[in-house]
Amino acid sequence: MEKPRITILYCTQCNWLLRAGWMAQELLQTFSDSLGEVALVPGTGGNFEIRLNGDLIWERKRDGGFPGPKELKQRVRDVIDPKRDLGHVDRAAKEGGEA
């Protein structure tokens, strides 16, 4: 079975490469054994979109800004491995605090 692919479309005009790279690193660190690829896709027009196997899981305008690592990891986990425990990320969410 082919491993999931994530694409992060970011706006080059807005200088969001560092943010896109940071999100890619967070996902690769957490899901290193579960992901097949995380690709950075340069774009324009204020776009910042994260797709998992082509399905939109985060869009800056629709979702009210940029994701934090915790929320993004939870959204990815909920699709690729819903039973996976994300450790401190999940514990902080259950306790009502931040990771």
Image (tube, helix red, strand yellow):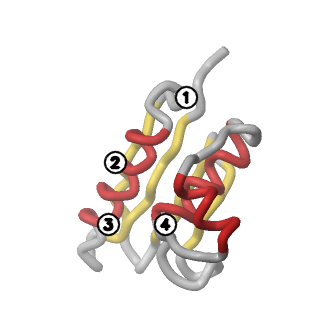
Q: Position of residue 25 (x, y in %)?
A: 34, 48
Q: Earlier in the sequence, mark 2 or mark 4?
A: 2
| Pointers 1 and 2 in contact (C-beta within 8 Å) | no
Q: Residues within 10 Å of mark 2 (few under 14, many from 20)?
A: some
| Residue lying furthest right | 83
| Pointers 4 and 1 in contact (C-beta within 8 Å) | no
Q: Residues within 10 Å of mark 3 (few under 14, many from 20)?
A: some
Residue 25 circle label: 2
SS of the residue at dot 4? Answer: loop
For disc 4, the marked residue is 99
Give amino acid for label 2: Gln
Name the mark nearer the viewer: 4 or 1. Answer: 4
Q: Earlier in the sequence, mark 3 or mark 2?
A: 3
Name the mark nearer the viewer: 3 or 2. Answer: 2
| Pointers 3 and 2 in contact (C-beta within 8 Å) | no
For disc 3, the marked residue is 19
Q: Position of residue 35 (x, y in %)?
A: 51, 31
Residue at (39% x, 50% y) in the render = 26
Give amino acid for label 3: Arg
Viewer-nearest residue: 98 or 28? 98
Residue at (51% x, 82% y) in the render = 65
Residue 76 against residue 36 in the figure, above or below: below
Q: Residues within 10 Å of mark 1 (few under 14, many from 20)?
A: some
